[in-house]
Amino acid sequence: MQGMIDGGFRPIVREYALSIAVWCGLSRLTGVQYRIFDKQLNIQSSRWDMLLLAESRGFSFALLTPPIFYLARRSIGVTHNRFRYVLGYCLGVVPCC
């Protein structure tokens, strides 16, 4: 997301493409693991179902990764107002509860 700072569109596309490539690769491994666990539990599922499940989760992670890195890079150096810094962290934790 460095492109958001520079104002270019091409770096943003590159960051998303890299993120999608990494997460989709990891998701294929996760899909294979899902399939192995389902076989052990005698659950009838196809390889396609497991890959689809894992890829959908990986794609959502891939879409969220670049903005998270952008926000982290942007806010790490800014510690002038500690209250705002702590408030941002607290607000980020609320959806996870």
Image (spheres, grey):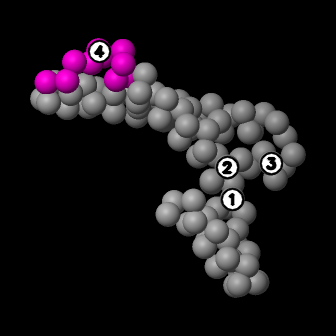
2 and 3 marks in contact (CB < 8 Å): no
In the image, is residue 54 part of the stretch drawn in magenta?
Answer: no
Secondary structure under tag 1 reads helix
Q: Residue at image x 71%, y 84%?
A: 83
Closest to the observer: 56 or 18? 56
Secondary structure under tag 3 reads helix
3 and 4 marks in contact (CB < 8 Å): no
1 and 2 marks in contact (CB < 8 Å): yes
**Residue picked out by circle 3:** 4
Query: What's the CA distance linking mark 3 and mark 4?
Result: 41 Å
Marked residue nearer the N-terminal end (2 or 3): 3
State whether residue 36 appears in this view.
no
The type of residue carrying mark 3 is: Met
Mark 1 Cα-neighbour bin, 10 Å: few <14, some 14–19, many ≥20 = few
**Which mark is on residue 71?**
1
The type of residue carrying mark 2 is: Pro
Residue 73 image-quadrant placement: bottom right
Q: Which residues are magenta?
A: 42-51
**Which mark is on residue 46?**
4
Closest to the observer: 94 or 67? 94
The type of residue carrying mark 1 is: Leu
The type of residue carrying mark 4 is: Ser
Query: Foreground mark, 4 or 2?
Result: 4
**Residue picked out by circle 2:** 67
State whether residue 78 appears in this view.
yes
Marked residue nearer the N-terminal end (3 or 4): 3
Query: Foreground mark, 1 or 3?
Result: 1
Q: Residue at image x 26%, y 31%?
A: 33
